[in-house]
Amino acid sequence: MRQILLDTETTGFHPLNGDRIIEIGAVEMVKRRLTHNNYHQYIYPERTVPQEAFEVHGISDDFLADKPIFSAVVDDFMNFVAGAELIIHNAPFDVGFINAELANLPNNRWGTIEEHCTITDSLKMAQMQYPGQKNNLDALCRRLGIDNSNRTLHGALLDSEILADVYLMMTGGQTDLLLSDSDTSTSDSTSDIASTQIIKPSLKVIRANSDELARHADKLAQMSKRSGLELNW
């Protein structure tokens, strides 16, 4: 299945209060390989960028002044993502902004992003794997040993590329993205040889001896007596 890692940068946090998308970055992955088929677009938001937002992503009003508005790029964007699984870190945020932009279009023929794509929230995945811990991209990179030293400011395309590394690590431990070369044609057999197969060794089972089992039973008996409950651990 075609997967797209996606991120946006915005003027703030609340699309219903007038905040807008100013950057979309998306990288395509097929069979756990980046394809170099990316989408990247800066967008003029038809409003100013607040200082606090500028301090996060470094995108200024002057830089955006000559960029196209969303309605001018929506068809290219929607045609790029249509039919794919969108993998987004904190998906409700980005999906909310995309749907707000779509809803603002006159005679919107696209509807909502969910009508064209499957949405996967990689933040929810991380929260299930690492409950009670920080699970933003920076924290996950540190935890998973991913180099994000180029990330001094938030940027949609860079964050999408980093998310690809994070997603691969969380779903199988493969960080070699095996970038495909668009100028080189390969046969199916060559592709099969190039693919990486992860072989996991069988786990060694260590069983408790009779003395350990007896001490365990004694401990359960003591706990059962103190709690008044029958314990069957």
Image (cartoon, rainbow, N blue to C red):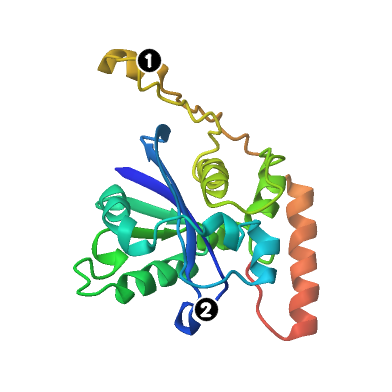
Where in the figure is residue 53, as x and y percent of width and height? 64, 67
Label 1: which secondary element: helix
Residue 193: numbered disc: 1
54 or 146, nearer to the observer: 54
Amino acid type at image mark 2: His
Q: Is residue 104 left or right of residue 171?
A: left
> Mark 2, residues whose alpha carbon is within 10 Å: few (<14), some, or many (≥20)?
some
Identity of the residue furthest to the bottom in this view: 228
**Residue 147: quadrant of the picture:** top right
Amino acid type at image mark 1: Ile
63 or 59, nearer to the observer: 63
Q: Earlier in the sequence, mark 2 or mark 1?
A: 2
Q: Is residue 179 above or below residue 81?
A: above
Residue positioned 79% across, 67% down in the render: 219
Where in the figure is residue 178, as x and y percent of width and height? 47, 25
Residue with the mark numbered 2: 14
Residue positioned 33% across, 55% down in the render: 73
Residue positioned 49% across, 28% down in the render: 198
